[in-house]
Image (tube, rainbow, N blue to C red):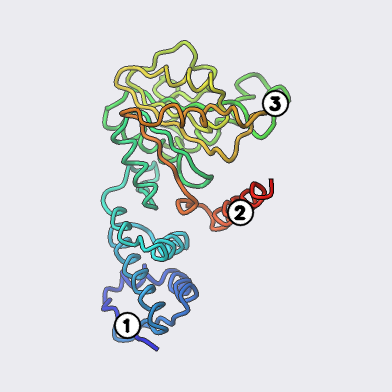
Amino acid sequence: MTEKILDIDNKDDLSALFGQFDSNIRRIENEYGVKIVVRDGVKIIGNEPLVSAAVKAVNALLNMSRSGQPLSDQTVRYVTSMVADGAEEQLAELGGDGVCLTASGKIVRPRTVGQKHYLNAIKNNTIVLGIGPAGTGKTYLAVAMAVKAFRERKVKKIILTRPAVEAGEKLGFLPGDMQDKVDPYLRPLYDALFDMFGADRFAQYMEKGIIEVAPLAYMRGRTLDEAFIILDEAQNTTSEQIKMFLTRLGNESRMVITGDITQIDLPDARKSGLVEAVNVLKGIDDINIHRFTEKDVVRHKLVQDIIKAYEKFNEGRRNHA
């Protein structure tokens, strides 16, 4: 048996590390098969390789907490996975200032290294394609960067759009006029903007045309100058649609295109405009293609487990094809 003692005497550090009802520390104990007690510091007891790994995880969590990162169950899972990959040193990239403040005063900040690289890509490139599974923050972080650019007066408008194709549903079957029909498809974009601006400010900006949330078809024939433009759910665009969208780019504008190529709702998944765009645009200067992995999922832990299960299932089906 090995014992290692970490000299942690700051009560705030200990409170953050242990979590509500000691949930964080219980997860670390279960992950590594060690015992953690507070006695003359924080003592970690167990077999040598597992104790060393637990020490790396605890130190990484402390550093994240001290840099302003809240320690949740998702954070602990992410840190232990990074330690398992020998990539815990990359977690230092998550320090520093957040992206922006929400209407409620919450700081929006990256919660994984993949999210941090995505934000850097948006900062340093005119067009970014963010591709990855559900729950990785592709859309929410893009909206946060749009809000940041608007507040810093780098753009005059925020434009968010999606193709009106979802899970086999047809617009004609939905009740109401055309706006009523397309609003359900745009709801995730509204929600993100509500969170950033608050309902009243969002309504004011919509009325003034500073914020525009519209179906992709409404973009045709326009030139979008001094705007931050986000195309969400781009896996459901056709080749013609995504080309049309990309060529709307005007002076002093930025574009972010997000999508999950494993969730294509088009009749023929092989003709997804996003899949084609990844191949067509790679290697072009000032265009970045960022890929998220299941490690970047920041929703409920079951979302990550579901994604892994489907990847395993699809891989097995391909092998037997």
Which residue is pictured at 38% across the width and 17% down the height?
224
Distance of mark 2 from mark 3, alpha carbons?
31 Å
Q: Classify the position of the C terminus by image quarter.
A: top right
Left or right of residue 276: residue 165: right
Left or right of residue 185: residue 65: left
Classify mark 2: residues with Cα within 10 Å, few (<14), some (14-19) or many (20+).
Answer: few
Q: Is residue 87 shown above or below 202?
A: below
Residue 299, numbered label: none
Q: Are marks 2 and 3 in contact (CB under 8 Å)?
A: no
Earlier sequence position, callout 2 versus callout 3: 3
Q: Position of residue 310 (x, y in %)?
A: 62, 51
Q: Position of residue 58 (x, y in %)?
A: 35, 70
Q: Under tag 1, what secondary structure?
A: strand
Distance of mark 1 from mark 2, alpha carbons?
38 Å
Q: Which residue is mark 2?
A: 312
Give, as a three-letter code, the residue at label 3: Lys
Q: Which residue is mark 1?
A: 4
Furthest toward the bottom, the residue is: 1
Q: Under tag 3, what secondary structure?
A: loop
Which residue is pictured at 36% across the width and 31% down the height?
283
Give, as a three-letter code, the residue at label 2: Lys
Earlier sequence position, callout 3 versus callout 1: 1
In terms of image quadrants, where is residue 101? top left
Which residue is pictured at 38% across the width and 73% down the height?
53
Q: Which residue is mark 3?
A: 170
Q: Position of residue 186 (x, y in %)?
A: 55, 30
Q: Nearer the viewer, residue 242 or 159?
A: 242
Q: Nearer the viewer, mark 1 or mark 2?
A: 2
Q: Position of residue 3 (x, y in %)?
A: 35, 86
Left or right of residue 121: residue 165: right
Q: Under tag 2, what secondary structure?
A: helix
Q: Are marks 3 and 1 in contact (CB under 8 Å)?
A: no
